[in-house]
Amino acid sequence: MVELQLLVPEGLVEPASDALIDELGALSVSVEDADTGTAAEHALYGEPGLPAPVGAWQRSLVKALFGDESAASEAASVLLAQEWAAAVGLQSITELPEQDWVRLTQSQFDPVEITPDFWIVPSWHEPPAAARHLIQLDPGLAFGTGTHATTRMCLRWIARRSASRGASWRRVLDYGCGSGILAIGAARFGAEGIDAVDIDATAVQAALANARANGVAMRVASPDAVQGQYDLVLANILATPLKLLAPLLCSHVRPGGDFVLAGILERQARELQEAYAPWCTLEVSDRDEGWILMTARVGVA
């Protein structure tokens, strides 16, 4: 494996990265602050879970991986010959030592604790001794793996409320299910009749695969398959779509049912409460890393 490093000004990071991946055969591309560790280092700040205001640093180090040195050299030559790339500089072409990339990647992910006895465990890990309830889910492009605060809060709520409310969860809806992790979590605590829906067909396939891996029976489909009312409705999306979906989501919660919303920043609590006021009274039930969990018992004063 050979690494090509280029020094790229802010405005050219995106076109350079696109050219390396789409036209010049790079296996992967990463971008770093070229001034890391110096007085000129500059952090890119943004809201939790949202992109930073700018997409790159004033001086970015673009690193591209190639299968061999000739491919990296040719890519550098072609890119630097482009008129628009006059400000791009070649830093180095370096052969990387052989590594077990799969094992290296796996070593970065450990089991995630939701509660002391409820854990999310990658398939290559042994479950912790304290794990009475667990979900097997591998990190990656799986649309929700338990490492994000919003997912952890939803699962924590399910675990903590299951003793008093779980027996009533005869129908459950996970709206915008992603990996299906919330639906699987509800099943782990006794929920039945679970529907998990998402507008993304790839997420639907991921949720189906994860349900099979965890031995969970649930229906996974697109949102237009949702019918009737549910005892528990979960929606971990973002504040803007949650506001737009307020009438629809509330119509699917049976009177007295549990309603759980996530993907909401602390500063957005009031606007969500106002959006849902005609149907229920949302309360903040948990906080984690700048995010909040909002819940309600629909039709209960």
Image (cartoon, rainbow, N blue to C red):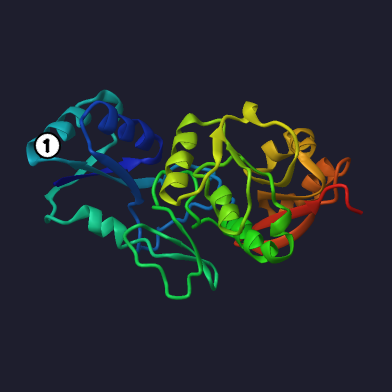
Q: Residue at x 35, y 30 (%)?
A: 15
> Can residue 86 be seen?
no
Above or below: residue 112 compared with residue 81 = below
In the image shown, does 76 or 25 lie closer to the viewer?
25
Dot 1 crowding, Cα within 10 Å, few <14, some 14–19, many 20+:
some
Farthest left residue in view: 70
Q: Which percent across, then down, holds residue 280?
A: 85, 46
Question: Which x, y percent locates residue 21?
Answer: 28, 32
Q: Amino acid at mark 1?
A: Ser
Q: Quadrant of the C terminus?
A: bottom right
Q: Residue at x 62, y 63 (%)?
A: 159
Q: Is 288 left or right of 54, judged from the image as shown?
A: right
Residue 32 is left or right of residue 24, and the answer is right
Residue found 41% across the figure and 46% down from its top: 58
Tag 1's secondary structure? Answer: helix
Q: Position of residue 265 (x, y in %)?
A: 67, 52
Left or right position of 135 against 176: left
Q: At 77% across and 42% down in the image, what residue appears?
A: 253
Compared to residue 205, the image places residue 297 above or below, namely: below
Whether residue 252 is visible:
yes
- Residue behind mark 1: 73
